[in-house]
Amino acid sequence: MADKMRATIFLEPGRIVLGEKPIPHIGPLDALVRITTTTICGTDVHILKGEYPVASGLTIGHEPVGVIEKLGSAVLGYEEGQRVIAGAITPSGWSNASLDGCHSQCGRDGPHGFKPLGGWRFGNTIDGAQAEYLLVPDAMANLAPIPDGLTDEQVLMCPDILSTGFGGAEAGKIRIGDTVAVFAQGPIGLCATAGARAMGAAEIIAVESLPARAAISRKMGADHVVDFTHEDPVSEIMRITRGRGVDVAIEALGRQQTFEWALRCLRPGGTLSSLGVYSEDLRIPLDAFAAGLGDHRIVTTLCPGGKERMRRLMAAVAGGRVDTAALVTHHFGLDDIETAYDLFAHQRDGVLKVAIRP
């Protein structure tokens, strides 16, 4: 095996390039995975724009599909050559957060307290997946074998987008018979729509203006699609629900406007499940919040990770409970990663998700 690999490297805001790096050396609990397919996430675009700070020289990307190239000396239960995925969130399995069931916030305790988003390491605090090889830490907690018969593209959404979207539905505690509104039908919003349907929502209202995304939204489970460029979404949702409001509103864009709409369309005692990555302070309107007395719940979610979460999501895919194939709209080689970023960051040509193959 060569000593060097190609990798997508963040240099400074506005500049992500394809460069060369040493292939990682693994420790006893790690695994080296040869990447066969990965993708670009909206969070990577936040990094590109400088809206989320990471170190210069970091390899970007957190959605790996690949083959085990090498195992650490203490890793048991896996074998080299096995097809695997790892979640965007890689809990250690032994931190306080992990043992308390909050795997996504698996920070390491220290004199300055808990590090938020600690479970998100790929492309954040360690080198990520948009490369030829990836070091997976705590491999026994994070590597999930891909079931026979599933392609890379069928499981490509599991590490982040599907886990996040489903996580938003789960955090909202959707019950059988609920009415749910999902604000924005990008990849995460589409997976939230699918998650709401899987959890038993009786009526799902998607808010989206792009016709292509509206069409996919209906395939993923939306009963109504409200175009916010033609009508006030809160008024239309109230009309659809006969003035009752929705049981759960899922915000999947990360904007002040969509957050407010989600809050305003809730029934009394309803839940706002927030999935968006916000790049500026949020304001909570006094009237929509009922001055703090409306029995509302506002919950946030960082996508659950770990091998058991990945196993469950792949089982849902294998069982035909969710089909994310329509989300992959473009394909690139790793050599064309800068072109892929330009397309994805500017949302041209109907792009939803891109498949990147080294």
Image (cartoon, helix red, strand yellow):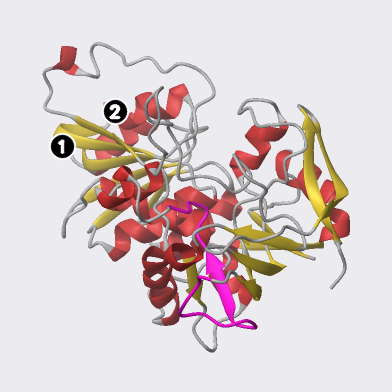
- Whether 321 is drawn above or below 327: the answer is below
- Residue 39, given in percent of the width and then of the height, sits at 67, 57
Amino acid carrying mark 2 in the image: Leu
- Residue 215, given in percent of the width and then of the height, sits at 52, 58
- Mark pair 2, 1: CA separation: 13 Å
Report the quarter where the C terminus lies: bottom right
- Taking depth in this image into account, of 185 and 41 the one nearest to the observer is 41
- Taking depth in this image into account, of 249 and 305 the one nearest to the observer is 305
Q: Please state if 213 lies on the left or on the right of 244 as rendered.
A: right
Residue 263's disc is: 2
Report the quarter where the N terminus lies: bottom right
Q: Please state if 249 lies on the left or on the right of 294 as rendered.
A: right
Amino acid carrying mark 1 in the image: Arg
Q: Please state if 259 lies on the left or on the right of 56 as rendered.
A: left
Name which quarter of the figure residue 335 lies in. Answer: bottom right
Q: Residue at x 63, y 25 (%)?
A: 51
- Taking depth in this image into account, of 216 and 63 the one nearest to the observer is 63
Residue 243 in view (yes/no)? no
- Residue 44, given in percent of the width and then of the height, sits at 65, 41
- Residue 156, given in percent of the width and then of the height, sits at 58, 66
* Mark 1 residue element: loop
Q: Residue at x 85, y 48 (%)?
A: 339
Q: Residues within 10 Å of mark 1 (few under 14, many from 20)?
A: some
In terms of secondary structure, what is the magenta stretch mainly? loop
Dot 1 corresponds to which residue? Answer: 244
The question of residue 82 being in magenta is answered with yes
* Mark 2 residue element: helix
Residue 259 in view (yes/no)? yes
Q: Which residues lie in the magenta part?
A: 74-91
Q: Residue at x 46, y 48 (%)?
A: 189
